[in-house]
Image (tube, grey):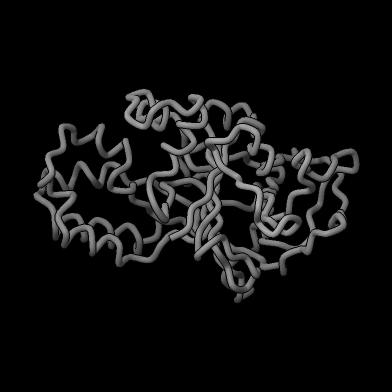
Amino acid sequence: MTESTTDALHALARQHLPAEIAERWIGLLRPALGLEKATDPAAGAAVGRLGGLPELPENEEWPVWEGHGPLSFIASLDCAALPSAALDIAVPADGTLAFFFFDGQLDDGRAAVSPYDPDSWAAARVLYVPAGVHLVERPAPQGIRPYPEVRLTARVETTAPYLWHPVVYREFAPMRDDHPLWDEDFREALWDLPGAGHCIGGHADPAQDDVESEVACGALGNPPFNDPRINEEALRWVLLAQFGSDDDAGMMWGDCGSLYWLIRPEDLAARRFDRAMFTWQCS
């Protein structure tokens, strides 16, 4: 973990929270791989890229949302180049992960993509290609404008949970309205820290509410929002990848929002990326 993110979060907690609460909150921090533009060749080898054209197996069809059209290529990651041993999720040690999303190019954004709508789940895909499979660069389908390519490097970071995440409620229940975690000074200090942007693993950086509960609602068939199963199901999902809006790649998700892919740990271990779920948020 980088000293910058780890030390900043530890210091923030110990400055603003009672000692016992601070240490318990620190125990909820999780490692992530922050992804940023590769601007200096000496800063480290590229681990993937945003945009450009994807490389896919010759027999792999370009992902399509039936009735709507082809998805846009968002990003790819070289799993062998990722320092994934630092993570607490089982990202593949080799092979390639490719992310696709129906971004509205073909319909001016009219089709809604949401975890609450099973008919839209095909609008976001994660493809995993094992090592050793021959890959071929694929041209974009008609009507799809590829995003400018931005090569990415990775660094290990420490991430904090959203303050209203079910994992926080589980750790500190029962939480009164005057709980120290909801103190205004602590919340503002936490929000003043840089956001996650693009990352693999760790805690998601939501623009609105916790993304785990959104996919949990979809996985459960959209029960009432006060259904206790939602919190239980949300705890079963972890962030696989987050890709924020990016000027260099020409990506803007709503109002400076982010795309999120989540997966259950057992599906990640089994390489069942077809079971990953997607949501997106903007401010």
Residue plotted at (38% across, 66% down): 194
Quarter of the figure with the C terminus: bottom left
Residue projecting furthest to the right: 58
Q: Quadrant of residue 23?
A: top left
Above or below residue 26? Residue 118 is: above
Q: Horizontal and vertical percent for residue 97?
A: 68, 45
Q: Horizontal and vertical percent for residue 129?
A: 75, 40
Q: Horizontal and vertical percent for residue 14?
A: 15, 56
Residue plotted at (15% across, 32% down): 174
Q: Horizontal and vertical percent for residue 281?
A: 48, 53
Quarter of the figure with the N terminus: bottom left
Above or below residue 60? Residue 154 is: below
Q: Left of 13 or right of it: where is 209?
A: right
Residue nearest the observer in this picture, 97 or 143: 143
Residue projecting furthest to the bottom: 40
Q: How many marks?
A: 0
Q: Left of 216 or right of it: where is 176?
A: left
Q: Left of 144 or right of it: where is 212?
A: left
Residue plotted at (27% across, 39% down): 168
Residue projecting furthest to the front: 110
Residue nearest the observer in this picture, 48 or 110: 110
Q: Quadrant of residue 144?
A: bottom right
